Image (cartoon, rainbow, N blue to C red):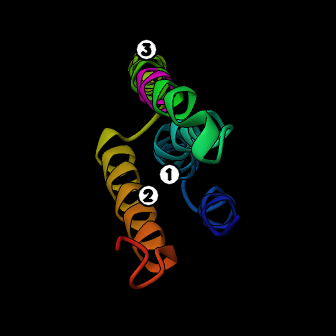
């Protein structure tokens, strides 16, 4: 939500930058949400094989969805600022890594 608010706040100042921010955040976060939805559908020791298969499927879907979204953005590259788009994409990627790292419980890997 913070990213959407930031994009909307920049829109009146420079619409190209606002749209670029929105696309950059979306290209990173939409595939990640799709991955999470797919990967964590199965839980428990009884469904380990199904869980592993879903992780592979989720990663494949995430990869192709990211590629498709990049293609859509570059198809409309004249309407956005590519530098701002890439900065937003990288910022969203780093933010998702940090959130993931903060949510992992210490000692859960043992």
**How many residues crowd around disc 1 within 10 Å: few (fewer than 14), some, or many (20 or more)?**
many
Mark positioned earlier in the residue sequence (3 or 2): 3
* Quarter of the figure that contains the N terminus: bottom right
Q: Nearer the viewer, residue 57 or 5?
A: 57
How many labels were placed on the picture? Answer: 3
Residue visible at 63% across and 38% down?
A: 46
Q: How many angstroms separate mark 2 from mark 1 (CA)?
A: 10 Å
Residue visible at 63% across and 56% down?
A: 11
Q: Does the magenta stretch include residue 58?
A: yes
Specify the quadrant of the image occupied by residue 75.
Answer: top left
Q: What stretch is highlighted in magenta?
A: 55-60
Q: How many angstroms separate mark 1 from mark 3 (CA)?
A: 16 Å
Q: Nearer the viewer, mark 2 or mark 1?
A: 2
The local secondary structure at tag 1 comes to: helix
Q: Which mark is residue 21?
A: 1
Query: Are dots 2 and 1 in contact, CB under 8 Å?
Result: no
Q: How many angstroms separate mark 3 from mark 2 (CA)?
A: 21 Å
Report x, y in % for residue 74.
Answer: 38, 21
Q: Which of marks 3 and 2 is in front?
A: 2
Mark positioned earlier in the residue sequence (1 or 3): 1
Q: Which mark is residue 2?
A: none
**How many residues crowd around disc 3 within 10 Å: few (fewer than 14), some, or many (20 or more)?**
few
* Quarter of the figure that contains the C terminus: bottom left
Query: Are dots 3 and 2 in contact, CB under 8 Å?
Result: no
Q: What main secondary structure does the magenta stretch of the protein show? A: helix
Residue, disc 3 = 75
Report x, y in % for residue 82.
Answer: 32, 39
Q: Nearer the viewer, residue 103 or 65?
A: 103
Left or right: where does residue 35 sit relative to residue 56? Answer: right
Q: Nearer the viewer, residue 73 or 77?
A: 73
Left or right: where does residue 77 sit relative to residue 22? Answer: left
């Amino acid at each position: 939500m913070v990213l959407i608010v930031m994009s909307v706040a920049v829109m009146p100042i420079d619409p190209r930058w606002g749209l670029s921010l929105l696309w950059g955040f979306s290209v990173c976060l939409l595939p990640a949400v799709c991955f999470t939805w797919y990967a964590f559908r199965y839980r428990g020791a009884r469904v380990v094989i199904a869980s592993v298969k879903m992780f592979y499927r989720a990663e494949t879907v995430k990869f192709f969805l990211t590629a498709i979204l990049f293609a859509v953005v570059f198809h409309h590259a004249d309407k956005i600022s590519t530098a701002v788009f890439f900065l937003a994409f990288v910022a969203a990627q780093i933010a998702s890594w940090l959130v993931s790292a903060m949510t992992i419980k210490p000692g859960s890997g043992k």
